Image (tube, rainbow, N blue to C red):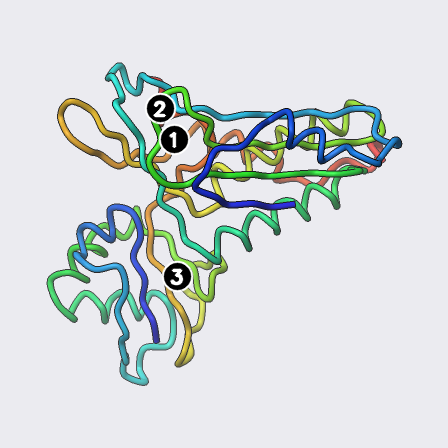
């Protein structure tokens, strides 16, 4: 299973991607996040604020209960900020 | 049509190409997003846009298809840049063309509103104090949410 990090999750993790092999007990996104937190400081730092973490599986936005299977590409990132203008005008 | 690219784009040329050989188009609406020099009261020196290659194209195509399903569009275009940009540079072009103006206006606003909350792009700003990631704005979520409900049947 491939795990990707983007934006500040990537800088916190200190890596942009990792190949991981979670145990059979990890069956969904929420389970993967919990397991990854125990797989080194980088993963733990990236996923430390779950409220700010968005997830895509195989390049489609999903929720925490989305099921996972071997070979999936799982991306973690903050809420997106594309489009015009540089951030908030406040 | 969807394009994700590092280089700048020529708005006039893009719009001309979009409407060429399509005389059924009566209205064309375009939105161009630019890098602003102020953010939260602070001067921005530059901005870097990161994205998720593959998912970005996929998500933009999905959003464009949603617009085509909701409005009678003759043509549409989304061009979004990534990489390091200076203040004043173009970031994104959204253009929609339809037989009548209302569909063009509404679908153009829909596309930029949805794009801002769904397409996997992230901005990092450079200020005198260093680089910082831009946080998502609640206003952007609200702007996207107002398109959540399907179009009323009466609009058909």
**Residue carrying label 2:** A88
User: Where, quadrant-wise, is the N terminus of chain B in this rendering?
Assistant: top right
Residue B77 shown left or right of residue A21 in the figure: right
Which element is circle 3 on?
loop
Q: Which residue is drawn at 64% across and 32% down?
A: B14
User: Where, quadrant-wise, is the C terminus of chain B in this rendering?
Assistant: top right
Residue lying furthest right: B24
Question: Height in image: B37 above or below B4?
Answer: above
Number of other residues with Cα within 10 Å of mark 1, as a class: few under 14, some 14 to 19, many 20 or more:
some
Q: Which of B142 and B124 is in front in this view?
A: B124
Quarter of the image for residue A21 reads bottom left
Find out whether the residues at labels 2 and 1 contact each other: C-beta distance under 8 Å: yes
Q: Marks 3 and 2: which is nearer the front? A: 2
Residue B35 shown left or right of residue A51 in the figure: right
Q: Which of A31 and B67 is in front in this view?
A: B67
**Which chain is mark 3 on?**
A
**Residue carrying label 1:** B137
Q: Which residue is drawn at 28% across and 79% down?
A: A22
Number of other residues with Cα within 10 Å of mark 3, as a class: few under 14, some 14 to 19, many 20 or more:
some
Relative image position of residue B27 (x, y in whole percent):
78, 24
Residue at mark 3 shares a chain with residue at mark 1? no
**Which chain is mark 1 on?**
B
Q: Residue at x 28, y 36 (%)?
A: B124
Question: Height in image: B5 above or below B125?
Answer: below
Q: Nearer the viewer, residue A48 or B130?
A: B130
**Residue carrying label 3:** A64
Q: Distance between the residues labelled 3 and 1?
A: 22 Å
Relative image position of residue B87 (x, y in whole percent):
35, 21
């Amino acid at each position: 299973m491939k795990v990707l990090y983007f934006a500040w999750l990537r800088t916190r993790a200190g890596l942009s991607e990792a190949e991981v092999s979670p145990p059979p007990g990890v069956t969904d996104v929420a389970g993967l996040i919990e397991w990854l937190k125990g797989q080194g400081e980088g993963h733990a730092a990236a996923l430390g604020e779950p409220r700010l973490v968005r997830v895509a599986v195989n390049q489609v936005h999903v929720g925490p209960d989305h099921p996972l299977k071997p070979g999936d590409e799982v991306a973690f990132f903050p809420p997106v900020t594309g489009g015009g203008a540089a951030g908030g005008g406040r | 049509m969807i394009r994700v690219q590092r280089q700048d784009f020529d708005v006039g040329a893009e719009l001309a190409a979009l409407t060429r050989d399509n005389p059924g188009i009566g209205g064309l609406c375009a939105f161009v997003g630019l890098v602003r020099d102020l953010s939260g009261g602070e001067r921005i020196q530059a901005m870097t846009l990161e994205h998720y290659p593959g998912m970005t194209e996929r998500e933009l195509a999905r959003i464009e298809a949603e617009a085509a399903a909701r409005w009678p569009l003759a043509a549409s275009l989304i061009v979004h840049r990534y990489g390091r940009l200076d203040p004043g540079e173009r970031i994104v072009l959204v253009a929609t063309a339809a037989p009548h103006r209302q569909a063009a206006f509404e679908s153009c606003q829909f596309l930029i509103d949805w794009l801002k909350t769904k397409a996997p792009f992230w901005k990092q700003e450079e200020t005198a104090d260093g680089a910082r990631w831009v946080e998502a704005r609640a206003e952007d979520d609200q702007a996207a949410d107002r398109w959540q409900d399907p179009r009323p049947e009466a609009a058909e």
